[in-house]
Amino acid sequence: MKIPYSLLLSFFFVQMGLSQGNDYPKNQDFESWTAGKLRMKLNKTWSIDLENQLRFKTNLTEYDRFFSQLNTQYKIDGFEYGGGFRYLQLNDNVGNKQGAENHFRFHLDFGYELDADRCLYKVRIRLQHRNELGLSKHEGDYPSKDLRVKASFKYNFRNWKFDPRMSWEVFRHYQTGALNGFNKYRLTFGTSYKINKEQRLALSYVQEKQLVYWNPKVTRILLVSYLYTIKMSKKDK
């Protein structure tokens, strides 16, 4: 089996990122993310996704959040444009005021996809804005804004159903009263299995690390996701 240099290089960067997380063993966590997504492909260019996701934190002992997200995407000549809305219920168990919080988030995406032989490269820029519902600015609701840049890679092996995929994403944060600037990165390594034409199951390992000088938090995540696709256009079937 011939392995491309781009795959070996991507694996090298994955190993570097994972090894850096061991520098500060005291500030770590392990989480689980479980997602289910329904995708409606209207035609070759337009698609709509509806996703629900449940997350647990503190080494899987505490509920973290649940969200529902509606996203739409337009693809043409390798370029991708998208936008979406997300409703979140967060479990705030830090500080004097704790309890369930309701948040609303929207985002805008711009990306480009390059299919080279059996390699698929993607770059995505996301602008997102989130604020807490039912709370005014005078009560402490300061909108959270992020600029996210993500690069991903996928290789399609011949006669192999578990094709590897990798991604690296960096976050730049903007919020009144918070530590702004590049504040964390997210590294993902995983695979997916095509059950049939409509269904796909994916398993990923994610490492998220804060970009701060003193005692950055490292979060390791196990992500399991299920995708069901409905093709509305007969030409796409």
Image: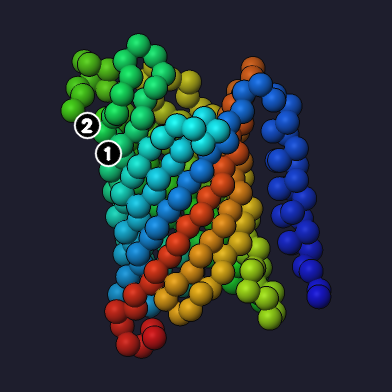
Residue 212, compared with residue 102, is above or below; it is above
Q: Amino acid at mark 2?
A: Leu
User: Which residue is most to the bottom?
Assistant: 235
User: Could you tell me which quadrant the C terminus lies in?
Assistant: bottom left
**Quadrant hosting residue 163:** bottom right
Q: Is residue 100 left or right of residue 78?
A: left
Sequence-first disc among 1 and 2: 1
Is the C-beta separation of discs 1 and 2 under 8 Å?
Answer: yes
At x 62%, y 23%, the residue is: 27
Tell me residue 76's x, y (percent): 41, 71
Viewport quadrant of the N terminus: bottom right
Image coordinates for residue 80, horizontal then vertical, percent: 43, 63
Residue at image point 27% right, 17% down:
140
Mark 2 element type: loop
Q: Give coordinates of residue 62: x percent, y percent.
A: 45, 32
x, y (%) of residue 57? 49, 34
Please state which amino acid type lies under the numbered disc 1: Phe
Q: Which residue is mark 1?
A: 104
In this picture the colour scheme is: rainbow
Q: Which mark is residue 133?
A: 2
Name, please, the residue furthest toward the right. 2
In the image: residue 84, left or right of residue 207: left
In the rendered image of this protein, does residue 191 appear above or below residue 64? below
Residue 172 appears in the picture as rendered: no
Relative depth, front residue between 123 and 4: 4
